[in-house]
Amino acid sequence: MQIDDYNLPRQIPVMTLRGVVLFPKAMMPLRIFEERYKKMLNERLLDDRIFAIACEREDVPTEEEHLERPFSVATAGLIRVSKENPDGTSFVLLQGLERVRILSVTQEVPYRILDVEPMATSMDTDSDKLRSAITDELKRNQKLGGDVNDEMLEFLSPLADDTAFLDLAAYTLCKQTTRKQELLEEQSFSRRANMLIEDLTKENDRLKLLNDALGGNDEKSSGFN
């Protein structure tokens, strides 16, 4: 199945995981070891190979942690690779398809199934200027010795889809789970792009101060790693 050649069902099985946020187009490796998810995987492989990843909320009372309450927006993904290990666990490579808004939980046993609706990005602005600003901050981050490297730039730069460019940059560079979820939930392209630009600028300014303190104040240099 091609990444754009699918019919998103209204009801989707889901893995609810703490500290895990998947973005559309991104690849996520998963180790399937719980019995409920083994069953889900086997059934998905015989069907459309689609299930969702929802990030579990951490701001819940201790007595409700077992309920695995998800955030309201998740990402439906397509199983690209599935390999069963000798110990009965499986390695899965899941590729994000699109954002989905969770309407309700329709099943809990043997695994959770969600009732969802697609959540397309709102292209509410000229994306070229925002993409250019993100690219500038990515290149600045690389020069300052940040997380951006040649391989990342070579992967992101040719992408024709501005939304994919933005989402993959955010998925790769945003480390904080809550912020990552905020970026996932933002439907407006311009607001999501400005959130990423703000985060990159803050990090680059921090790296610049650190470089200056260490005597490496030339952003044209490669910084340090």
Image (cartoon, rainbow, N blue to C red):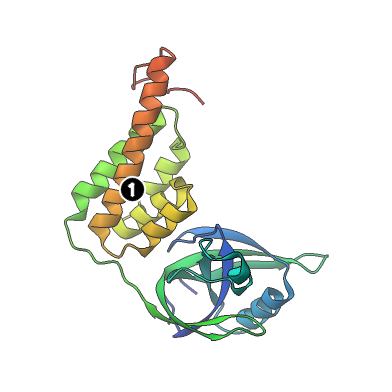
Give the camera-side residue of 126 and 1. 126
Give, as a three-letter code, the residue at label 1.
Answer: Leu
Q: How many marks?
A: 1
Q: Secondary structure at mark 1?
A: helix
Residue 4 visible in the current orientation: no
Give the residue at mark 1.
196
Does residue 15 appear to the left or right of 116 in the view shown? right
Q: Position of residue 45 (x, y in %)?
A: 63, 79
Residue 40 appears in which quarter of the rendering? Answer: bottom right
Residue 36 appears in which quarter of the rendering? Answer: bottom right
Residue at (28, 37) in percent of width and height: 136
Q: Position of residue 43 (x, y in %)?
A: 65, 83
Does residue 37 appear to the left or right of 186 in the view shown? right
Residue at (47, 59) in percent of width and height: 26
Q: Position of residue 127 (x, y in %)?
A: 21, 54
Residue density around tag 1, few if under 14, some if 14–19, many if 20 or more, within 10 Å: many
Residue 195 to residue 189: above or below: above
Give the camera-side residue of 190 and 185. 185
Residue 206 to residue 164: above or below: above
Residue 201 appears in which quarter of the rendering? Answer: top left
Q: Position of residue 168 (x, y in %)?
A: 41, 54
Residue 218 to residue 57: above or below: above
Residue 24 to residue 216: above or below: below
Residue at (42, 47) in percent of width and height: 155
> Residue furthest toward the top?
215
Residue 165 visible in the current orientation: yes
Residue at (67, 74) in percent of width and height: 37
Give the camera-side residue of 160 and 39. 39
